[in-house]
Image: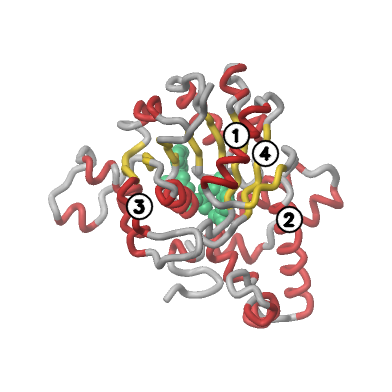
Amino acid sequence: MERAIRKAAVLGSGVMGAAIAAQLANAGIQTYLLDIVPTELTTQEKARGLSLNDAAVRNRLANEAKVRLLKTKPAPLFTARNVELIAPGNLEDDLARIAEVDWVIEAVVEKLEVKQDLWAKVEAYWHPGMIVSTNTSGVSINRMIEGRSEAFRQSFLGTHFFNPPRYMKLLEIIPGRDTDASVIAFMKWVGERVLGKGVVLAKDTPNFIANRIGTYGLMVTFAEMMRDGWTIEEVDAMTGKAIGRPKSATFRTLDMVGLDTFVHVAGNVYSSVYNDTEKAAFQVPELLHTMLANGWLGDKSGQGFYKKT
Ligand code: NAD
């Protein structure tokens, strides 16, 4: 079968879904960007006399993502030029559209059950030749598609982009137990030649490679910082610009990742690692739970370790 990615669909239009859709559009690929339907009207929607049934409300999340992308400054792997190739929609009214696409990539909230439910719905529109992949940071690829058909499982793999995708060249590809070798080879080619990434193959172990190491490093940083009384600014000064990593100071990165997402990612590795000593290393610090309880999610809520200006 002659493979090509002409059309794609990204499910989830949050921090990563929107940015991945932008990468695809940037490569000239028409992309549906779908998210959940809001259950409440905003003050502005009420003022405009809209109801929950109006398309503008039902597509709000993906529409807002597209607006954000149009305002994003050009970066090594991004220009807003092709953002018009992104068609925003929602997962209830528009899911059937994925039947037309060559690649469905899921970037919804980092919860196993949510992803499992979504893949069951996607399978209804799956056709031979359609690649299906997840952007999970570390949920098991194989568990996510338990109950799906063999043909679906053969077309399924992890394609883990790094944040922000417009700067980060790394793409982890995580084959599942049943992924067809031709699908792995093709997606490696797509990653490298179509999207301009550097591809690393990883196994389906908790948080794969990069996030397993990264989460561990963060946990150690937290523990040492609390014990020895370093400040957030001191840690960032030592882990960012001054050492030639302008975009990856520890706490600035956490704000960009999203503290809610990080807690899910750490929780996933905590529940999956092998013994109590390892578990202790991945226990989420109380401080993060307190921040989340206050609605401090990082850049996406305007407040995390830093206030977004
Ligand atoms: P996000 O919170 O910004 O977006 C998640 C999206 O999921 C939201 O738009 C939300 O509306 C949607 N959603 C919530 N509940 C849902 C449901 N029940 N069904 C369908 N959609 C639902 O999160 P994100 O940072 O974009 O992360 C998305 C995925 O990408 C996660 O699996 C995450 O682990 C992974 N990831 C995140 C990063 C990062 O740095 N943030 C990096 C790499 C991978």
Q: Amino acid at mark 1?
A: Phe
Sequence-earlier tag: 4 or 2: 4
Residue pointed to by mark 2 = 283
User: Which one is earlier in the sequence, the residue at label 3 or at label 2?
Assistant: 3
> Position of 72 compared to 169: left or right?
left
Residue 159 horizontal/vertical position (percent)? 59, 42
Q: Which corner quadrant of the image does residue 301 belong to?
A: bottom left
User: Image quarter for residue 53?
Assistant: top left
Front of the two marks 4 and 1: 1
Nearest to the eye among marks 2 and 1: give it. 1
Q: Which of the two discs, 3 and 2, sits closer to the camera? A: 3
Q: Which mark is first along the chain, 3 or 1?
A: 3
Vertical placement of 292 versus 104: above or below? Answer: below
| Mark 2 vs ligand 1: CB below 8 Å | no
Q: In the image shown, does 7 or 250 lie closer to the viewer?
A: 7
For marks 2 and 1 on the same chain, the one whose residue lies earlier in the sequence:
1
Q: Secondary structure at mark 3?
A: helix
Mark 4 Cα shell of 10 Å, populated few (<14), some (14-19), many (≥20): many
Is mark 4 in CB contact (under 8 Å) with mark 1?
no
Element on which disc 4 rests: strand
Residue at (61% x, 23% y) in the render? 153
Q: How many marks?
A: 4
Name of the residue lying farthest toward the left: 49
Instruction: Name the secondary structure under disc 1.
Output: helix
Say the numbered circle drawn on residue 186.
1
Q: Position of residue 109 (x, y in %)?
A: 51, 45
* Residue closer to the observer: 49 or 87: 87
Residue that numbered label 4 is attached to: 174
Residue type at mark 3: give it.
Asn
**Hey, which quadrant is residue 218 in on the image?**
bottom right
Closer to the chain start, of discs 4 and 3, is: 3
Residue under circle 3?
82
